[in-house]
Image (cartoon, rainbow, N blue to C red):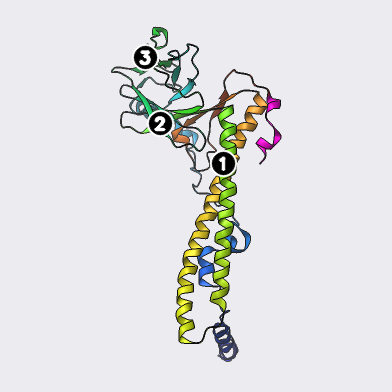
Amino acid sequence: LFIIGWVGLIMIPYFMLLSKLGIFRVDPIEELVGLDHAHHGGGAYVLPINPPIPKPSESESDGEEESSKDKEKAEGKGVFISDINYKGVKKGSESDEYVEVTNDSKATVEISGYSVVDINHHGTVKETVGTTFVFPTPTELTPGQTVKVYTNEIHKESGGYSFKSGSAIWNNKGGKGVLMNRAGTEISQFVYISQKQLLTDIANTKTQLDKARDERQVKNREWRRLRKLNARPMTTREEKIERRKIRANLKIAAKEFTLASKVVTDLKKALKALEGQLEHLKKLGSSCSKVEIHSSDFSDDDSDIESQRCAGEDINVSDISDSDSES
């Protein structure tokens, strides 16, 4: 009891004094922004968004193998877009363009009603949906089988499928093919982008990043200016009314600064991804990057990209300056 009384007698007045002086706790607005952003310009830690999913044991896998094979045929598991020949040889319509769909599972897969969708997409350009092909009934893919869907040609040896389009489908600058099941759920996508467009997107992203950094700097200065005004002693009624206005504006400035910081972070991630593709092209000496992505492997950090392949067109790697791939 003596210790409790002694500590209370000393500490309670001390805490009351700190509260009176306004230094008992961090500024509420600063709590909203966060000390990392306020004083260090970004988050101190990068926390995993999705926890790792434990894999089943070998005995469990053996027990479920038979039921999994039965589900594959119904769910289309193992079916994906394996390649896109986006640049046809035939001039004009480029009717010999094609997209490949492969079954790499151990079971026959029913893909009747599945659709292949052309999506114009490259870098930071907004996506637009183009032409769609729907597999007729019945259509099955045996284990390891690959079929091709041509822009406007029929080849029986590869399935005999065609978009029957009188004009080219796959954008030579860059695009994306998406495979959807009968329910309209995306199960695979294949992204490609030309080297020339990649350099253009890197330059555009750098410009956007510079503007976003300038905007963040402006928001940060305004937030700090309002913080200083809010910290001034105000005793009169008019001054207290003014403080309320300052605090309201301070909250708005804090939110705007936080949003501006997020824009900078997102653009830095986009630029890093583009520069990674460019570096890969420089190593392989190719003018086109192709990335195959399985929707079942999607994650926030895009770390589950299974394969990356390039077209056979050679480029002069020395024409790509080091500044273009600067991290």
Main secondary structure of the magenta stretch: helix
Q: Earlier in the sequence, mark 2 or mark 3?
A: 3
**Residue 205 circle label:** 1
The span from disc 1 to disc 3 (Cα, nearest Å) is: 38 Å
Residue found at x 47% / y 67% = 251
2 and 3 marks in contact (CB < 8 Å): no
| 322 falls in the magenta region | yes
Q: Position of residue 318 (x, y in %)?
A: 71, 26
Quadrant of the rendered image containing residue 107: top left
Is residue 295 rendered to the left or right of residue 315?
Answer: left
Q: Position of residue 75 (x, y in %)?
A: 35, 29
Q: Which residue is mark 3?
A: 161
* Pick the front one: 237 or 67: 237
Kindly report which numbered mark, 2 or 3, lies closer to the viewer in this rendering.
Answer: 3
Q: Earlier in the sequence, mark 1 or mark 3?
A: 3
Q: Which residue is mark 2?
A: 187
The span from disc 2 to disc 1 (Cα, nearest Å) is: 29 Å
Q: Secondary structure at mark 3?
A: strand
Region rendered in magenta? 317-327
Q: Position of residue 306 (x, y in %)?
A: 53, 30
Kindly report which numbered mark, 1 or 3, lies closer to the viewer in this rendering.
Answer: 1
The span from disc 2 to disc 3 (Cα, nearest Å) is: 20 Å
| Image quadrant in which the C terminus is located | top right
Q: Earlier in the sequence, mark 2 or mark 1?
A: 2
Residue found at x 57% / y 79% = 232
* Pick the front one: 8 or 183: 183
Q: Secondary structure at mark 2?
A: strand
Q: Position of residue 263 (x, y in %)?
A: 52, 50
Is residue 310 rendered to the left or right of residue 111?
Answer: right
One can see residue 219 in this view: yes
